[in-house]
Image: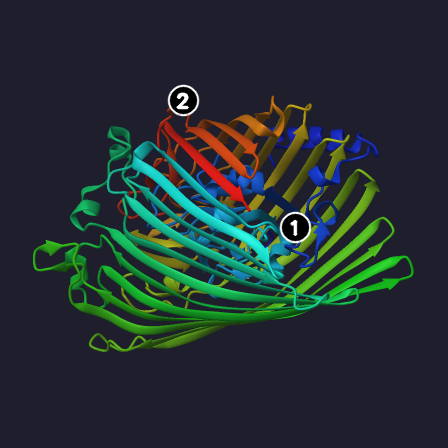
Amino acid sequence: MTHPTPALSRRALRPLAALLLAGLGAGAHAADDTLLNPVVVTGSRSATESFELPYAIDVVDRQAITAGQLGVNASEALSGVPGIVVQNRQNYAQDLQISVRGFGARAAFGVRGVKLLADGIPATNPDGQGQAATFNLDMAERIEVLRGPFSTVYGNHAGGVIQLFTRDPAARPSLSARVLGGSFGTYKIGLGAEGTRNGVGYLLDVSHFDTDGFRDHSAATRDQAYAKFTAAPDADSQLTLTANGLRQNGTQDPKGVKWATYNTDPKAVEQIALDYNTRKDLEHAQAGATYVRRFGAHRLEVQAYAGQRSVLQYLSIPAGAQGAPTSSGGVVDFDRDFFGVGGRWIHNTEIGDDVLTLTAGLDYDWAEDDRQGYNNFVGSTLGVRGILRRDETDTISSTDPYIQASYDSGPWTLSAGLRHSRVRFEVKDDYLSNGDDSGSQTYSRSTPALGLVYRLSPAVNLYASAGAGFETPTLGEVSYSSGSGTLNLDLKPSRSQQFEVGAKARIGADTRLNAAAFQIHTDDEIVVASSSGGRTTYQNAGSTLRQGVELALDTRLNRQLTAKASFTHMRAVYDEAFMSGSTTVDAGKRLPGIPATTVYGELAWKPLGEGFTAAIEGQYRSRVEVEDTNTDRAAPAYALFNLRLTAEQKHGDWTFGQMLRVDNLFDRQHVGSVVVGDAQQRYYEPGPGTAVYAGLSASYGF
């Protein structure tokens, strides 16, 4: 069938047109490349100025990640990036909700549809399920956010790519300490050490976070540890070793609430969460190594990683529902072992005045879960481990060869990429009293991308790109069929075609403007079939269509004032009708979990140079549908404002820092995130009211 391309609203296109005209009229002004043209590696896999790339990519620098922030959730750093919605669920048992141009919005827990990487090592499993909680924000140097067609060259589930890079150790040895505290019984303490000795750099950090939570039954603790070692075996090579650990024990799960409960008391939880004492224990440990060797203009990169993850989670599935022979119980218990290896060769060749860069690589990732399920009751006692109801071994692997090329000739740059992903699921059922649910499935697909940049002037680049991607179901999505506990191996991967056009402009010496328009058509979209009692099942819908515009502006108004702004408007709809159970979802209905409009603005004032900063942040999110038919009450639109103050003083070998942060300055009641498609209409996850945090830090250099 043909798929029409509805026009975007005039209201959305007006700011795009105005800003594009401003950029095109700017001329070839000199620009401060340090401020306006960050170097990135995501997408091209080699160090390239973001201004020269044919896709939307933004960089969040260290100051934005750490200054005046708690360093707990990635939502703190990513709220100003266009095209991305990061919703803090106020629920550390379920992690953040992250969506990029709509990819990942339906995730019931964790992050799916978005590739997560830390120092080049995946924080996403081979099936596409990831956890942003493993990101160590205290040690971050920058975060790169790639959107659009070239995300697909990262393979399965790469609707977007979020990559964190930790900073390298300083040459001078130092010790540091930090402490912060504030609303809802929240506090965090941390200790660090770094330096370089005999050519070996070291960066060490440990932290402890504790909160009672804004909502009832939402207390959490989080212990993190991080270590990084760097060495140069010779003048042409670099070796980096990293290790990180995360522990969250007794993390309470407040779950979503009904609309009436939200209106009565935004802090409240439904009684079922208390009855079953919904909670989660998590332990995660991982280590990796990266080796880079230069051969003149060429480079070889090799990496390997391995780790272990354990989860024990108590759900709120009613005891009566667990009487079915196919039930897997209401307690999830698994131990996961995982590892991966990857390598790439980057070849640079000059052809006259032109430059050709070729990259060829291979990634292999593997994970195995030893998984059990238990009843969440014993007799009349709820929220305790009962009898065994599930026992299986789940293995997932992916093998991905890829090749990319970039050809730079005069005012033109042509980029292309091709990746072939082969993802295999295998389930070995050892609980046979209800039948053998063993099975396997293999998904494979090639995902190409093509992009072109034209340098209209030294200050303005125009670009266009196109690509095809796919998303396999995650292991959690194939674990249950509707109405039974059997595997749903008939669930097909979704396939997308993406198109993007844009402009990148440097206006004068102190302003950067990026603008993009995109369209994404997806077949066999994986959607929620049912969600009840803590368990969600999935099905394939028909096609979907997402169209939107993104704008990002970063400017220095004068020596004391800087401003940032981003704007996203997206139309995300079902492009054809489909059946969800016995209900028809009509074409034109909005995809749940995706706001049509998001806006972010920030104004920072530095009256005393770099030592003191005062900033106000504002963010707006339009209403969000909560289920496919768009008939239940949508989560309302909201606008929030935050204030932050930071200061730093240097006294000899000492450096001291202070911060004060006020979130939701005007105490606006709002729904921070939604649980898509919950059968009991517990869709709404309330956001906190006004919250105040203060912190101190000190470091000593030897």
At 70% across and 30% down in the image, what residue appears?
19
At 32% across and 50% down in the image, what residue appears?
93
- Please name the amino acid that badge 1 sits on: Phe
At 79% across and 64% down in the image, what residue appears?
297
Q: Is residue 524 left or right of residue 41?
A: left
**In the depicted structure, whether residue 553 falls above or below residue 409:** above
Q: Which residue is mark 2?
A: 666
Q: Position of residue 238 (x, y in %)?
A: 65, 64
Q: Quadrant of residue 489?
A: bottom left
Q: Position of residue 181 (x, y in %)?
A: 36, 35
At 71% across and 57% down in the image, what residue appears?
450
Task: Give the SS element for disc 2.
Answer: loop
Count the marks: how many? 2
Residue density around tag 1, few if under 14, some if 14–19, many if 20 or more, within 10 Å: many
User: Depth check: 344 or 538 in front?
Assistant: 344
**In the depicted structure, whether residue 308 falls above or below residue 277:** below
- Coloring applied to the structure: rainbow
Distance (Cα) linking label 2 and label 1: 40 Å
Task: Give the SS element for disc 1.
Answer: strand
Query: Visible in this render: residue 219?
Result: yes
Residues marked 2 and 1 touching at CB (< 8 Å)? no
Q: Position of residue 208 (x, y in %)?
A: 36, 47
Q: Is residue 696 left or right of residue 32?
A: left
Q: Position of residue 207 (x, y in %)?
A: 40, 48
User: Depth check: 461 or 467 in front?
Assistant: 461
Query: Visible in this render: residue 489?
Result: no
As drawn, the residue found furthest toward the right would be 352
User: Depth check: 684 or 98 in front?
Assistant: 98
Q: Which residue is mark 1?
A: 499
- Please name the amino acid that badge 2 sits on: Phe
Residue density around tag 2, few if under 14, some if 14–19, many if 20 or more, within 10 Å: few
Q: Quadrant of the N terminus?
A: bottom right
